[in-house]
Image (spheres, rainbow, N blue to C red):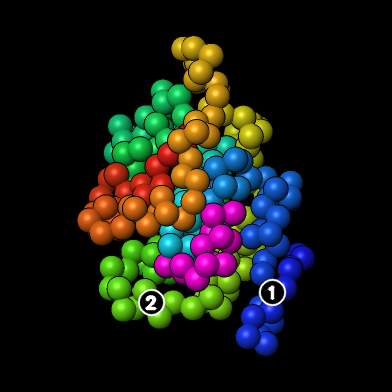
């Protein structure tokens, strides 16, 4: 695993390669995961550490959803409490997972043995850190804490191979049941992707507060992905 180093105030900080080069094919990331990680890097560079956690969480959520679908949607539906929450006929990743609580995705991934208990605990830690609404505590989050989390999650999640589903589907291929109604449906909604950290900041206050509740079925802060 490679790193790049930033020197600030005579302190050398090692950045995980995934922040500098999320395009590396070793990670098998899709566009919005790459965007979110680049956003995370930008937010760290301007010392918006609590918002960087949101960007990191967005990339993780999408990655876990893709891993579950790749492993096998029928298998996933056997473990989910309410099968109707998963929109199997949705045209996009967002559509299919819209009604499923993000925190539960960690649990489902563990039940399917797509992540181990160490990764489960790491992701749960990140979830509760980014869900903290205490402004004073959020101000105390340091660059070193965020970088450490990224490094650990890179090692324990992003660098892990996608486990094959029973159909042997490529992780970059969308659900085989998708039927595009028009040409525009085949395009990514890149125009809707937030452009800067200001988009994250605009989602603060009540919007952050509502979305941070682990039992909120619409717990999707960054919900522009497809």
| Residue holding disc 2 | 139
In what element is the residue under mark 2?
helix
Magenta includes 37? no
Q: Residues within 10 Å of mark 1 (few under 14, many from 20)?
A: few
Instruction: Give the residue displayed 43% in from the left and 58% down from the top.
Output: 54
Q: CA distance from mark 2 to mark 1?
A: 22 Å
Label drawn at residue 6: 1
Secondary structure mostly taken by the magenta-highlighted segment of the chain: helix
Instruction: Give the residue displayed 70% in from the left and 48% down from the top.
Output: 23
* Residue at the extreme top: 182
Quadrant where the N terminus sits is bottom right
Magenta includes 43? yes
Q: Quadrant of residue 171?
A: top right
Q: Nearer the viewer, residue 85 or 151?
A: 151
Can you give x and y, in whole percent of width and height, for residue 99 in the image?
A: 31, 39
Classify 71 as above or below 64: above
Mark 2 and mark 1 lie on one chain; the one further toward the N terminus is: 1
Which stretch did the figure color magenta? 38-50
Can you give x and y, in whole percent of width and height, for residue 167 in the image?
A: 61, 29
Instruction: Give the residue displayed 73% in from the left and 50% down from the top.
Output: 24
**Residue 123 seen in this snapshot:** no
Q: Quadrant of residue 160?
A: bottom right
CB contact under 8 Å: marks 2 and 1: no
**Residue 24 seen in this snapshot:** yes
Classify 183 as above or below 81: above
Can you give x and y, in whole percent of width and height, for residue 143 in the image?
A: 53, 75
Q: Nearer the viewer, residue 69 or 180?
A: 180
Can you give x and y, in whole percent of width and height, for residue 149 in the image?
A: 54, 70
> How many numbered markers are drawn?
2
Q: Residues within 10 Å of mark 2 (few under 14, many from 20)?
A: few
């Amino acid at each position: 695993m490679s790193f790049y180093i930033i020197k600030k105030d005579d302190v050398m900080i090692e950045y995980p390669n995934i922040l500098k080069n999320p395009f590396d094919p070793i990670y098998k990331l899709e566009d919005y995961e790459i965007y979110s990680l680049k956003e995370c890097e930008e937010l760290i560079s301007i010392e918006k550490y609590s918002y960087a956690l949101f960007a990191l969480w967005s990339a993780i959520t999408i990655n876990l959803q893709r891993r579950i679908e790749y492993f096998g949607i029928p298998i996933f539906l056997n473990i989910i409490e309410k099968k109707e929450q998963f929109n199997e006929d949705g045209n996009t990743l967002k559509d299919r997972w819209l009604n499923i609580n993000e925190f539960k995705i960690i649990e489902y991934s563990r039940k399917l043995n797509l992540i181990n208990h160490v990764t489960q605990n790491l992701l749960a830690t990140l979830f509760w850190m980014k869900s903290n609404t205490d402004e004073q505590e959020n101000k105390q989050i340091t660059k070193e804490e965020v970088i450490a989390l990224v490094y650990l999650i890179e090692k324990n999640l992003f660098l892990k191979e996608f486990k094959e589903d029973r159909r042997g589907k490529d992780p970059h291929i969308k659900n085989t049941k998708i039927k595009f109604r028009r040409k525009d449906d085949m395009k990514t909604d890149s125009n809707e992707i937030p452009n800067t950290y200001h988009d994250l900041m605009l989602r603060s206050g009540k919007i952050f507060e509502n979305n941070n509740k682990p039992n909120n079925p619409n717990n999707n802060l960054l919900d522009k992905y497809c």
